[in-house]
Each structure stands twice: as structure tokens, then as C-alpha cells.
Image (spheres, rainbow, N blue to C red):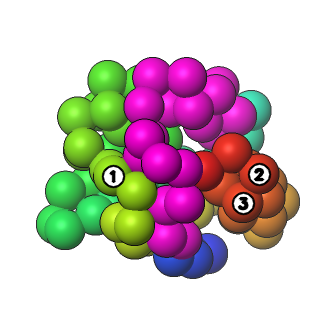
């Protein structure tokens, strides 16, 4: 299992556009990618679940990746967060 934390820098937080891109990116891997914030969790492949978390600018999200290609998936997810959020 791989995991990392990321503090959201996007002024609007995780809104529809980046949430959609995140879900699309997470679906490219066999591993299960999970987001967690303040006790709420959501599968990174579920757009509405991600948006339902209400992640705002300055919030820290914990990302967990578990599965066959977890190293590649974790690296890709971390890069995605840095570039888009």
C-alpha cells in the first residue's frame, strides 16, 4: 500500500473539472485509489463521491493506493495533484 498527503492549492478546491480529470486518471490503473479528508473517504474513480467530500483550498487530503500497479499509480496520482490541484 502506498499513500501520500497533499494540501489543496487550487482557490476553488476540488470542483467539477479537476474532480472529473482525477476520476478519469484514477481509472487508468488497476489499483484502488482512495481519498480521505476529516474521516470522509471516497473512491477516486467516483466523481460525485469526490465532489461530495467538499474539499476546499487549504484542506489536506490523504491519498491511498493499493493494488497490482500501486507504485506507478501513486506516482501518477501525486503528479496529478501537484499539476492540477
Q: Which residue is mark 3?
A: 82
For marks 1 and 2 on the same chain, the one whose residue lies earlier in the sequence = 1
Front: mark 3 or 1:
1
Cα distance in 3D space between marks 1 and 2: 17 Å
Q: Residue at x 60, y 50 (%)?
A: 85
In front: 49, or 66? 49
The answer to whether the residue labelled 2 contacts the one labelled 3, judged by CB atoms less than 8 Å apart, is yes
The N terminus sits in image quarter: bottom right
Secondary element type, mark 1: loop
Answer left or right for 65 relative to 70: left
Cα distance in 3D space between marks 2 and 3: 4 Å
Q: Residue at x 72, y 60 (%)?
A: 82
Disc assigned to residue 56: 1
Secondary element type, mark 2: helix
Cα distance in 3D space between marks 3 and 1: 15 Å
For marks 3 and 1 on the same chain, the one whose residue lies earlier in the sequence = 1
Magenta stretch: give its range. 6-26
In front: 2, or 23? 23
Q: Within the image, what quadrant is residue 76 found in? A: bottom right
Q: Horizontal and vertical percent for residue 68?
A: 72, 57
Disc assigned to residue 83: 2
Q: Is residue 56 visible?
A: yes
Amino acid at each position: 500500500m502506498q499513500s501520500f498527503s497533499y494540501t489543496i492549492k487550487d482557490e476553488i478546491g476540488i470542483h467539477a473539472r479537476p474532480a472529473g480529470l482525477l476520476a478519469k486518471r484514477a481509472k487508468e490503473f488497476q489499483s484502488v485509489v482512495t481519498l480521505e479528508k476529516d474521516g470522509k473517504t471516497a473512491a477516486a474513480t467516483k466523481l460525485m463521491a469526490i465532489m461530495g467530500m467538499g474539499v476546499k483550498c487549504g484542506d489536506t487530503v490523504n491519498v491511498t493506493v493499493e493494488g497490482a500497479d500501486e507504485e506507478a499509480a501513486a506516482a501518477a496520482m501525486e503528479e496529478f495533484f501537484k499539476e492540477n490541484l
